[in-house]
Amino acid sequence: MKQTHPIPSVWNADSRILILGSFPSVKSRESGFFYGHPQNRFWRVTAAVFGCAVPQSIEEKRAFLLENRVALWDVIASCEIVGSSDASIREAVPNDLSPILSGAKIERIFTNGGTADALYTRHLLPKTGIPAVRLPSTSPANASCSLEALISAWRQIQTTVKL
């Protein structure tokens, strides 16, 4: 079923890194914000990396991102997708990253998982010319990666922001 991305990007002029997922899950689309599935570890991982409490509300999550100079969005603007399955993504139309890249001083782009990385490389790298750093997915589907391993791998976002 054709889906259009319903969540606006989060960023401001102070953002220094851009984290890109693939496309919002059903739970994220229902909640109206990124990483809305309670089993997705994105908020726990990034809070641990930045030494903060895990944000709960959409307002807290947005403030947490901006305070830590993180821009957040997804690679895909619209696509055919079955449920929340990245593997089912077809007919992908990429988001336009130019407002973020021209409006903030993005120093590095990170992708949340293999599908986001592959979609970024295929659809957006030719336009941006900025290679992305692939991070392990925080999705509950990536159950083989422990919370501790995710936090360790994701620490590089904090190092980048503190430069």
Image (cartoon, grey):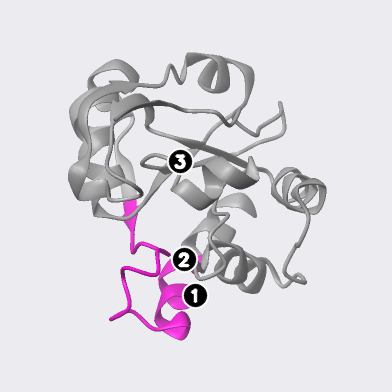
Q: Secondary structure at mark 1?
A: helix
Which residues lie in the magenta part?
134-155
Q: Residue under circle 3?
A: 108
Measuring from the top left, give residue 157's x and y in whole percent.
Answer: 52, 57
In the picture of the structure, the residue carrying the numbered disc 1 is 151
Label 3 Cα neighbours within 10 Å, binned few <14 / some 14-19 / many ≥20: some
- State the image quarter where residue 14 is shown: top right
Q: Nearer the viewer, mark 1 or mark 3?
A: 1
**Visible residue check, residue 163:** no
* Amino acid type indicated by mark 2: Trp
Residue at 39 percent across and 84 percent down: it is 146
Q: Is 27 placed above or below 121 here? A: below
Q: CA distance from mark 1 to mark 3?
A: 18 Å
Callout 3: SS: strand
> Is 26 located above or below residue 97 in the figure?
below
Question: What label sits on residue 154 in the rendered view?
Answer: 2
Amino acid, disc 3: Arg
Residue at x 78%, y 48% (from the top left corner)? 67
Is residue 69 in view?
yes
Question: Quick check: is 149 in the magenta stretch?
Answer: yes
Magenta segment includes 127:
no
